[in-house]
Image (cartoon, coloured by chain):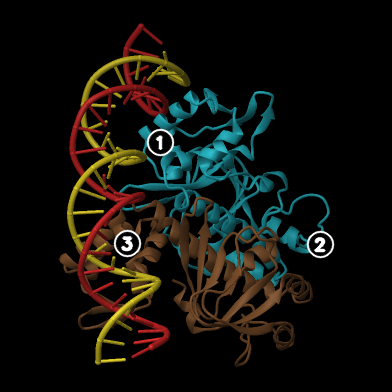
Chain colours: A cyan, B brown, C red, D yellow
Amino acid sequence: MRSSATKDLDGILGASKNEPPIDQLSWEAQSEIESLKVSFDCPASTVLFIEEQAPDSIFYLLTGQVKLSMNSCAGRRQILGIANPGETLGLASALSGSPYDITAETVSPCRIAKLTRTIFIEFLARNPSAYKNLARELCLDCARACELVRRLGLAATAPERLARLLLEWCAGGSTTERGTRLLCSLTHGEIGECIGVSRETVTRIFHDFKCQELLESRGSTLIISDLRALEICAGVA
Amino acid sequence: MRSSATKDLDGILGASKNEPPIDQLSWEAQSEIESLKVSFDCPASTVLFIEEQAPDSIFYLLTGQVKLSMNSCAGRRQILGIANPGETLGLASALSGSPYDITAETVSPCRIAKLTRTIFIEFLARNPSAYKNLARELCLDCARACELVRRLGLAATAPERLARLLLEWCAGGSTTERGTRLLCSLTHGEIGECIGVSRETVTRIFHDFKCQELLESRGSTLIISDLRALEICAGVA
DNA sequence: CGCCTAATTGACACCTCTCAAGATATGTGG
DNA sequence: CCACATATCTTGAGAGGTGTCAATTAGGCG
């Protein structure tokens, strides 16, 4: 899930080290961004912005994790994913001026650089070359959304959806001799909100998967023993 | 559904009329695009590109309509929506270089301007100001995907999903004294593929909606009589 | 140790899918 | 204009999956 962004912090607000390659902003633009942005720390469960709000600012995540979700009046919630350091949040809305279409809430203590939309737009007017970085960020957002649509729309059953989600997570896991190991700090309820399924169903399917020797879990660590079988469950193989 | 794009043809390949406002490409860039793009006609049911293919070109839709969808190995299909004249297809993939994540197929005879990725990338290198238009297009793609996620993830039941879809369509309909009138050329099967529901279920829910006096249909024209009640069905009100 | 959250498990109802049959519409060729 | 073929819509019956409710267990933390 956007694992690349966790490695190279080259977001629109993140040009802060080394020399700028062709892809990045000029030194002048970089130092200007540095002087415009405001960094701050915030605890877990801080709401950065809420869907349907007018876009006030963009947020560059320095450390910590942020949960991106959508909420319905009926109390239903769809989790889009977890943003990692290096990602910029609220870009599309800040650029188009339309309301935020998602809600962003920290899941751990975070350090965040913030830029108000007004200043951001003015900066863009002075540094049109920044649009290139912007476009690349937006592509990632599109890709994330497409992956979610694939998860929700192309998977008919709950086991299929969970299998797909786990496979996505495997991309960011570490390979051991017992299988792919990955950390999952989400509760069953939250996993359910990732795939549009109830909390209890997640529990049941995890149980089934364990019985089928597809995976094992100890606390928040998850070990995918049989990747191939999981792919079959996901309907990918 | 991106109704704005149907009005002003200001896509990355569509700068072809009037004088260029601040937002648009320079005259030089416009004429360069004009000379680079290749226009052609194609019949209905022409596949422009398929998901997982390497991004070969971008496509600017001049006339006609194009169905955007995702397909699974299991034969399941998710329709993302119908692209209208003025939209550019395949932008995100062409820019990032990652495979197309959707499939595009004409649903009517179309006139299309095409630009190979190589030429497109070279053009961008010569005209970095085009990134601005690009970013705006990508924002629209993001918004479309978000709307779809909302339709699939936030609506629990089939009636809710159909109601949400109809409400989206209402934005592009015309208001009469009997209600909002709109044209829908999709079959029940295709509507089902828009909302992840079977063909028969779509028929049944339409029947229910008619019984509840929410709407009436004659051929391919649909009249939403009671918008308010439909919003309640959608869980929006 | 006690509290609280999360996980687990079972029972049951409901929704939706699938399969099947028939009706209606649309288009084509004689 | 009619007969036919094809596509689409309609409706019913049955089965399976999933949500909901409820009760219990496990785990984390002060």
Type of amino acid under label 1: Gly
Residue A44 in percent (x, y) is at 50, 37
Q: Is residue A79 left or right of residue C4?
A: right
Label of residue A189 in the image: 1
Which one is closest to the eye, mark 2 or mark 3? 3
Q: Is residue A153 left or right of residue D2?
A: right
Q: Taking the image as drawn, is residue B66 in sight?
A: yes
Per the model, the C-alpha gap separating discs 3 and 1 is 26 Å
Instruction: State if disc 1 and disc 2 touch (CB < 8 Å).
Output: no
- Establish if B67 lies above or below B110: above
The image quarter containing residue C3 is top left
Q: Which residue is mark 3?
A: B162
- Image quadrant containing the N terminus of chain B: bottom left
**Closer to the camera in the image, A28 or A153:** A153
Residue A11 in percent (x, y) is at 68, 54
Q: Which residue is mark 2?
A: A22
The image quarter containing residue C13 is top left
Type of amino acid under label 2: Ile
10 Å neighbourhood of mark 2: few (<14), some, or many (≥20)? few
